[in-house]
Amino acid sequence: MPDPMSVASGICAAGALLSSWQLRRRAVRAEAEIDHLQAELAAERHAASHDPLTGLPNRRAFYRLAATLLTDAAGQPLIAVVLDLDDFKQINDRYGHAAGDQVLISVADRLAGFAGDNLVARLGGDEFAGLLSSPTVDRRWIEHSTRRLAETVAAPIRLNGCSVRVTASVGLAPVSGPAQLTDALSRADAAMYQAKSLGGARSPRQLVDSAWLTEL
């Protein structure tokens, strides 16, 4: 006949093991839930600051990140860029909105590749903005970079078994501090709309901030 004390001791040991196992399970579940909540929070933060279609920073994030970059630049000039696709509505009308979305994604990828580690964002619709560092503010460098940017966007895009080409109107302006950001973007935006008003006179359409370049 089993010793009652041994039986009781065994039951207590088994109970302790069971309790320890349950505590470990609860701890694992709690850690998994915390990881899940943190992932959801990170996803929400990313969604709040990024364009859902292209994955680029959105307008709000662009202004915040640009202000930080300009503060850290310690007065070193950066180049504010505003870019708008020409006659983008025709893409949607002819090929459909899904095709238009694909064009925007392709353009965003090209801009990101062109900018490298620099800031590029989608402001909305078919309008993009950037804040680019430059080794110099020489006129030739500015003109060369603007031409390269326009040509990068204008390269053919494969779409539904065919190839389409979209051009862009580009405006840019130098900016050396956070307080100048709004003014620089306004000047870049004005230059971009002036480029757009040129129609097909220049291909690909482009216009640097001529008012600033005359001062160099």
Image (spheres, helix red, strand yellow):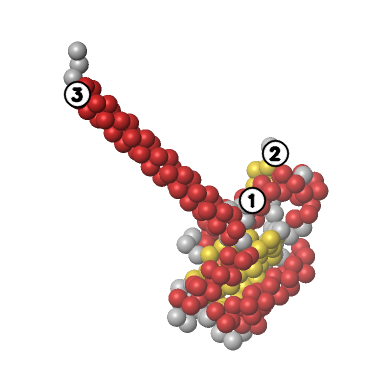
Label 3, residues with CA under 10 Å away: few <14, some 14-19, many ≥20: few
Q: Residue furthest top?
A: 1
Q: Is residue 171 visible?
A: yes
**Residue 10 falls in image quadrant:** top left
Residue 155 visible in this rendered orientation of the protein: no
Q: How far from the left and from the top, in percent, is residue 49?
A: 58, 60
Q: Return the residue at label 1.
A: 53
Where in the figure is residue 86, as x and y percent of width and height? 73, 60
**For the residues bearing labels 2 and 3, Cβ distance under 8 angstroms:** no
Q: Which marked residue is nearer to the observer: mark 2 or mark 3? A: 3
Mark 1 Cα-neighbour bin, 10 Å: few <14, some 14–19, many ≥20:
few
Q: Residues within 10 Å of mark 2 (few under 14, many from 20)?
A: few
Q: Amino acid at mark 2?
A: Asn
Mark 1 vs mark 2: in front: 1
Secondary element at image label 2: loop
Residue located 22% across and 28% down the image: 9
Near-viewer residue (29 or 112): 29
Q: Dot 3 corresponds to which residue?
A: 6
Quadrant occupied by the N terminus: top left
Provide the residue designation for mark 2: 160
Measured from the top left, where is residue 90 in percent x and y? 79, 52
